[in-house]
Amino acid sequence: MKYVVGISRVFVGILFIISGFIKLNDPVGFSFKLEEYFSQGVLDMPVFEPYALAISIFVVIFEVLLGVMLLVGFRVKFTVWSLLIMIVGFTFLTFYSAYYNKVTDCGCFGDAIKLTPWESFIKDVILLVLILALFLGQKYITPLFSFKGRSIVTVISLLLCIAYCNHVLNHLPVIDFRPYKIGANIEEGMSVPEDAPKPIYDYAWKFDVNGEEKVIVTQGDYPQVDGEFVDVETTEVQKGYEPPVHDFTIEQDGEDFAASLLQEPKLLMVIAYDLRKTNEEAYAEVKSVTAKAKSNGYKVIGMSASNNEQTQALVDKFKLDFEFYFTDETTLKTIVRSNPGVLVLEKGTIKQKVHYNDLDALEFN
């Protein structure tokens, strides 16, 4: 039992630190995932949606601290109980989400590692077994340092987490795991290789044969049956290749201008996924930055999922000298964790990406 506890302690502690740090690098992204859990029938608690970011920050910092506390052996009983309660909650959420297909990505490792709902559930079951071993073998979790030393390590970890979280919230994630990172080409991200795996479907063909229903399952070919065709049900049994950039459009009046705009040699995008939640205080500087960009030969556009009335109201209020296009809200949230945020592109390649607090860092050639 001693060795089982020792291995579990190291594995669980390191995994919680890594998982927590990845989400700590992007707490806004994790808050979007929590909003999905609150609103898509998993928890069915829309009242918590406005507090998703605060909950996200607390959870990710607590996750890192539990990993640190487990490794150094600080407050063992509290740590193990907290780990057990947390993993039981995570296991329930991932099972419910997988079984009912509510949230297709748990967000356990942010955008760094994508897990399917069932993969997330299996991961949580393994962790639950390991944490149960820790719970039953608490006496074998021996401290690494004195009580004062363990306290200092925990407090320093907490302060570092708070400082790092404050930095990424007021700027952008230090490590960008998304397909819209600086240096990425959006058009290339949307392309599908010729040898990419294709989706596989089962087709359940229903026929009326002499008054009786007959069902024949194939993977594409229409079956030759001496009867009257009734219906066909299609089930995806294997997903095909999905490009890292998808659902990306730049629309106006129902027309998609993405192909032409991504060929612009100098393009500046002002991105505000929801104008009801945007930081309006930033738009005075946005106006100044976009005017400077235009004087340097840049085409400037706005991108939002808000309706025409809302975008026009913002343009009129701040006398902005550019038009807004429509893009899917989830896509805009993925592109930049700032509302508003600004991207500078060269023929579809992202050259600069900044938070509204860093607009003065933009450079125009």
Image (spheres, rainbow, N blue to C red):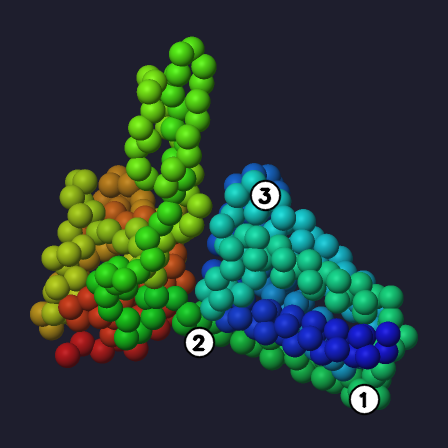
Q: Quadrant of residue 189?
A: bottom left
Left or right of 44? Residue 279 is left
Q: In which quarter of the image is residue 44?
A: top right
Relative to 214, residue 160 above or below: below
Percent across and percent down for residue 252 are 18, 45
Q: In the image, which disc is placed on residue 174?
A: 2
Residue topped by disc 3: 99
Locate the C terminus and report the quarter of the image it occupies: bottom left
Residue at disc 3, secondary structure: helix
Marks 3 and 1 sit apart, C-alpha to C-alpha, by: 44 Å
Locate the N terminus and report the quarter of the image it occupies: bottom right
Residue 305 visible somewhere in the drawing: yes
Query: Dot 1, crowdedness within 10 Å: few (<14), some or many (≥20)?
Result: few
Percent across and percent down for residue 124 are 66, 59
Left or right of 113? Residue 281 is left
Residue at disc 2, secondary structure: loop
Q: Quadrant of residue 224?
A: top left
- The residue at the point 23 percent across, 55 percent down is 302
- The residue at the point 28 percent across, 41 percent down is 307
- The residue at the point 18 percent across, 55 percent down is 258
